[in-house]
Amino acid sequence: LPSQLSHEGVLGDAVVVPNGDMDHLTILMQSHVFDFTARLLNTFERDVYYSAEAFGAYIATPFDSCKTSEEVKLMKKKKSSRLAKCRGDRCLQAGQLNEAMQFFNSAISDSKLQSDWEWVAGAYEGQCAALLAFHQKTPAQCSKEIRAMAEEALTYYEKRGAWPLQLELLLKMANYEAILGSKVACSEKLLAAYTLADKYMEPQEKLPVTGAIALTFKKIGFKRKYSFYLWIASVLYRKTNNFAAADYLLKEAAKSHFLGPILERSATDSRVAVRN
């Protein structure tokens, strides 16, 4: 059907597949897949290597103010360095890791000249992702470089005051350390993440972060900290008047550490008393 046709106001391409044997349908589907792949490749090449205009007059984030002409002029000056970061992201998504690293390197050097700190941090984080993709089967092989780049990213996020991005990266690095079996380093990142969340977030916002921290502590076998953060999540649920969830988490915390051993001993003592 032509793309101009619409259903309930939604435009899009539709393809009618005729009846036929499996060989015919296979050839037809392959041709559509090849066509779709070619479109993706053309879009990728346009965005990465040719058209800077595809990204607009400037590239802004929620951390930027673009209310005055001077602020807009400043954003336009930062476009080339930010464009390098965006192109690095496109290459990373497409699996072009060497090209991604080159764009990220360019973004880091140019963004530093513009004092564009969250984009410096974002490019460092992009480099972390590219390195991990290079060594996805042996993540420990690049651990020194990953940690160094992540620390740079965290420093620049903090310098910019971009605490949501800083918090997200702390949780990512905690999971990375957990995968490597570096329990102490993982714990440090989780504690730093909660400190940041506790400083800036409301109780409702802190709930998913606290839950993620608790589950990561469970993953590395830190039962006491797992129980503690379940208890914190329970307190947060009470503040939001969700008492059923709060009670459930308290029971889980008790089962995991605080009261579990006591309940087990009590049950054992009772069985011994009955036998006697």
Image (tube, grey):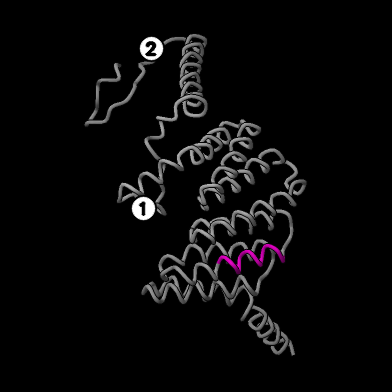
Please state which amino acid type lies under the numbered disc 2. Answer: Pro
Position of residue 94 measured from the top left corner of the image (x, y, whole percent): 56, 31
Q: Residue at x 41, y 70 (%)?
A: 202
Question: In the rendered view, would you say 46 is above or below 272?
Answer: above
Question: Which residue does the numbered mark 1 point to in the structure image?
Answer: 65
Q: Majority secondary structure of the magenta segment?
A: helix
Q: Residue at x 49, y 71 (%)?
A: 198
Q: Quadrant of the C terminus?
A: bottom right
Of all residues, the one furthest to the right in this rendering is 141
Assess disc 1: are there few (<14), some (14-19) or many (≥20) residues with their C-alpha within 10 Å of its C-alpha: few
Position of residue 132 measured from the top left corner of the image (x, y, whole percent): 67, 43
| Disc 2 to disc 1, C-alpha distance | 53 Å
Nearer mark to the viewer, of 2 and 1: 1
Assess disc 2: are there few (<14), some (14-19) or many (≥20) residues with their C-alpha within 10 Å of its C-alpha: few
Position of residue 103 measured from the top left corner of the image (x, y, whole percent): 59, 36
**Lateral position of residue 259 relative to residue 4, left or right:** right
Question: Which residue does the numbered mark 2 point to in the structure image?
Answer: 18
Tag 1, which secondary structure? Answer: loop
The reply to whether the C-beta atoms of the residues labelled 2 and 1 are less than 8 Å apart is no
**Lateral position of residue 180 relative to residue 228, left or right:** right
**Lateral position of residue 230 relative to residue 222, left or right:** left
Position of residue 183 measured from the top left corner of the image (x, y, whole percent): 72, 63
Question: Which one is nearer the viewer's eye here, 30 or 203?
Answer: 203
Q: Residue at x 52, y 53 (%)?
A: 117
Please state which amino acid type lies under the numbered disc 1. Answer: Ser
Question: In the rendered view, would you say 70 is above or below 216?
Answer: above
Magenta residue check for 191: yes
Q: Find the magenta span and give its range.
A: 184-193
Magenta residue check for 156: no
